[in-house]
Image (cartoon, grey):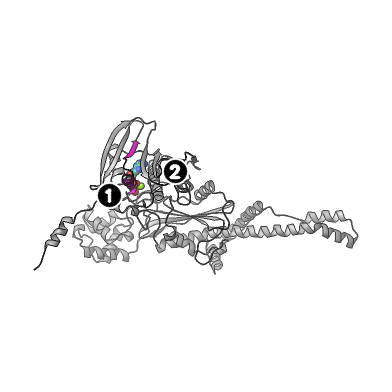
Amino acid sequence: MADDTLAHELAKMQKEISVAEFFTKNRHLLGFDSKRKALLMAIKEAVDNSLDACEEGDFLPEIQVEMVQLSEFKYRIIVEDNGPGIVKNQIPNIFAKLLYGSKFHTLKQSRGQQGIGISAAVLYSQLTVGTPARITSKISPKHPANYYELNIDTQKNQPKITKEEVVEWKKDHGTRVEIDLEAEYLKGRQSVDEYLKQTAVINPHVTLVYTNPKAEQTIYARGIDQMPKKAVPIKPHPYGVELGMLINMLSMTSSRTLQSFLTSEFSRVGSETAKEICSNAGIKTDTKPVQITRELAEKLIEGIQKTKLIAPPTDCLSPIGKELLEKGLRKEIRAEFYCSTSRPPAVYRGNPFIIEAGVAYGGEIPKEEKITILRFANRVPLLYQEGACSMTKSLTETSWKPYGLQQSGDSIPIGPAVILIHMSSVWVPFTSESKEAIAHYQEIMKEVKLALQDCGRQLGSYVRKKTKIHSQIERANMFERYIPEVADSLAQLAGANRSKILEGLKKMLVKPEIEKEIFSEEDADDEKFRMKFGKKEGSDEDERRETAEEA
Ligand SMILES: Nc1ncnc2c1ncn2[C@@H]1O[C@H](COP(=O)(O)OP(=O)(O)O)[C@@H](O)[C@H]1O
Ligand SMILES: [Mg+2]
């Protein structure tokens, strides 16, 4: 006898799970897996949003970050910006509804992308402390400021407003976020302090005023008064589209034919290219998008792969640039030598990206330790999961010995260096929702290696010159020590005046001055190079020399 009672029993238990409930149980997926990390994540989500908002509104960012210890493991965080503010009726959704944001559906470089950042911090606060999030926001001097106290109804994934009022606020515009949470404040490599310092390195246009729980204040003043170049949204590139996304786009489009769908929804598809895609897919150009079945959509993807397309536009990116990158490093790291590079745009899965790298060497950086790797994605420091990140892998797979660092096999090199890697992209392929490590795409890893090799060559040339000059100085010192004895012997042999000989020998002694020599010699080198080859950076000659060095 077939018994269906169990199926009916199970049916009673089967129901929808809200995202908020899901993340309540799986907070580690969002990065809130320890008290220490939770503090960093909450600050990071708020600061990243503030920076994105200021840049979108064209306001030079001035961000205040404050942490107050309420009890042993209870902290209050306050983040305030001078951005464009948030319109009143959006405030509850932004802070108390998961997966709600403005960036998920646009393809342009920004710090946030999923729409799950700040609301995750509010959810964690609610789970650990229970007090509502307190938000103040103002959109212009003409408008009053709105103040909200908010919780999340986790079953419905909807905001619960506990207080709502209009308040006085001295600011012209901006947003202030105040959240209490279970946390632990520690210094060190993965701390809030480190995150803010690295944020200042990679965003030289930002002023950060930071007050730690001991009420000590640090001000990271901006190094330049210019906003970064604004990123422009682009449409998806056909090479990046996957089956599910394509089916979804086909069902949403208002285009009436496949051809017009292709030209209007994608970048780099004109009518000729659209016809070519259709013919490569074996589908008629005037097919209605609604008539495209799953099987046809698969054929369409094959057709796209067979068609030669121009790479996506890159004005959706806002790289930092070689000069500013170096400026950022100089501003926050005391070293004796700095160099940097910014690669031309490349593409992975249809998404354009740019890799930039920089090196700070010597000076106050410890000599006998592993180098420090600073990883960034869209101007956000990545502090966790260094070992799981493709940037780290590209770095360790680069051989650093020719560039003057110690390294055994594919390990992290040792020496007085800080190496910075930055990826700018419309979509950074993180390995998880907590946005800590970048996935191992071949295209990305190759670009990182090329950027590192470029910096490596500059570093190697500096280290070699420095070593050469040091040995010259050593020889000169040796000579200097023996001058009196030599003078004695010569005076005896030649029967000449000892003090004259001594004077003559001293005149012969030329000691190089380190700073002057290294840099003047480099300039002279550059000049010679330009005269011979017309250009220096990234030239073929450079690449060839590189391969020879590697061999
Ligand atoms: N300080 C702020 N000023 C202006 N807008 C903000 C601010 N914080 C958040 N927002 C808006 O709220 C949205 C949701 O933020 P968030 O949950 O962190 O997701 P994401 O940053 O990934 O889009 C953002 O896309 C942005 O439009
Ligand atoms: Mg965000």
Mark 2 burial class by Cα count in 10 Å: few <14, some 14-19, many 20+: some
Q: What's the residue at 35%, 54% (across, down)?
A: 28
Q: Amino acid at mark 2?
A: Met
Mark 1 burial class by Cα count in 10 Å: few <14, some 14-19, many 20+: many
Of residue 414 and residue 145, the one placed in the foreground of this image is 414
Residue at the far left in the pictured view: 1
Residue 143 vs 55, above or below: the answer is: above
Of residue 480 and residue 345, the one placed in the foreground of this image is 480
Residue 36 lies left or right of residue 358; in this view the side is: left
Give the image location of residue 408, x and y in percent. Answer: 53, 66
Give the image location of residue 160, x and y in percent. Answer: 26, 41
Q: Which residue is mark 2?
A: 227
Which mark identifies residue 92? Answer: none
- Element type at marker 2? loop
What's the magenta region? 111-140
Residue 101 lies left or right of residue 2; in this view the side is: right
- Element type at marker 1? helix
Q: What's the residue at 12%, 61% (across, down)?
A: 5
Residue 475 vs 159, above or below: the answer is: below
Give the image location of residue 208, x and y in percent. Answer: 46, 41
Residue 93 lies left or right of residue 393; in this view the side is: left
Q: What's the residue at 89%, 56% (across, down)?
A: 497
Query: Can see residue 534?
Result: no
Q: Which residue is mark 1?
A: 20
